[in-house]
Amino acid sequence: MAQSQAPATHADAETAWQSISTDWSADKQTFRVPWGKAMMWIFLLSDTFIFTCFLTGYMNVRVSTAVPWPNPSEVFGLEVFGVSVPLLLIGIMTFDLITSSGTMALAVNFGYRRDRGRTAALMFMTAAFGALFVAMQAFEWTKLITQEGVRPWGNPMGASQFGAAFFMITGFHGLHVSAGVVYLCIVAFKVLRGDYEKRGYEIVEIAGLYWHFVDLVWVFIFAFFYLW
Amino acid sequence: MSAATGQQHPLKLYFWIWGLLFLFSAFSYGTDFLPHGYFRWGLILLFMVAKAGFIIAIFMHMAWERKALIWAILGPPVVLLVLIALMVIEGDYTEFTRLNSFSAPIVPSGHAAAEEANH
């Protein structure tokens, strides 16, 4: 036992490959992070596979259809004072999510400084930006369903797979954002109450990992669904 | 205890990355005004990868984790490239057979359904 712990003390001197073999073969825990953080990363890894399968499925139907795909730039455009701006709402939603990612990163930082007030405030702010995102998405869906006549089985603009791909991908992402808002509010409330004074504030970083991942998924959805 | 494992970095770094994410989001949005083609696709992917890299490396602190965790998390998604490649090939083939075998004039298949929905 004493031998197996020896490599950890001079960890800085080892090369990348040595550190991998040390961590995986030392007959002890592999990841030198809190277990909750390792589990969150593994959950996010599984989520990566789910979202990639959705986006790949969407890519496959879009490539294989012989009918023209509706132009997202026009479908998701908004008219502002009589001028139609392409992808306006989606652009605002993107900036909204980036902003929330920034406030979350700051919350993690203040958490480790044990500044409970600022940590909770920044987390509630992050959740508020998240809720705003879901609200804009609800507006987008409503416009698409009631005004453009988009259904999961067809639409007046082109390939009928458009609706199914759109509702499934953005719906699943929106569900993640909604769950994240609830998750952040719970953790922020517990931070404020002082629940983590003894256990430490890794929990804020773990919640942050989830939130940044939601933003990360949106980066890919924005590129592949809206900009293609 | 927590101070030993915690990720503590200067605030300045986060503000820098935050700014860069805004900048690249603006660039990303800007690509929508370019004509479709390889140039536009290149820029879309470039900005996408840059944003994803900043978020994972800095905001999610992956840059400071040990290699055992980095490889365990970032390694497996590489196999997804195989799935994507297979589905591109399969999708192209399906389109080819559709264009080849259905010679009738192509009508948007969503038309009938959408009209039904409107009534």
Image (cartoon, coloured by chain):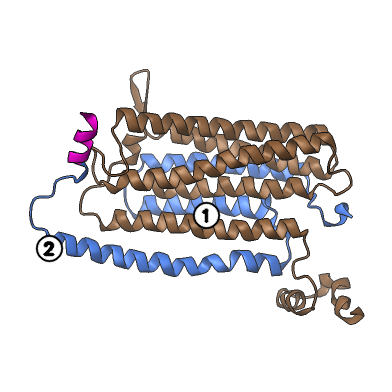
Residue B118 among those drawn in magenta: yes
Q: How packed is label 1: few (under 14 Cα within 10 Å), some, or many (20 or more)?
A: some
Q: Residue furthest left?
A: B104
Count the marks: 2
Residue bearing the label numbered 1: B49
Closer to the N terminus: mark 2 or mark 1? 1
Q: Chain under label 2? A: B
Q: Position of residue A190 (x, y in %)?
A: 78, 38
Three-letter amino acid code at the position of disc 2: Ser
**Residue B24 seen in the current view:** no
Considering every residue shown, the one lying at the far right of the view is A2
Let me know if residue B115 is in the magenta part: yes
The Cα atoms of the two marked residues, 2 and 1, are separated by 39 Å
Badge 1 amino acid:
Val
What segment carries the magenta color? Answer: B111-119
* A181 shown above or below B98: above
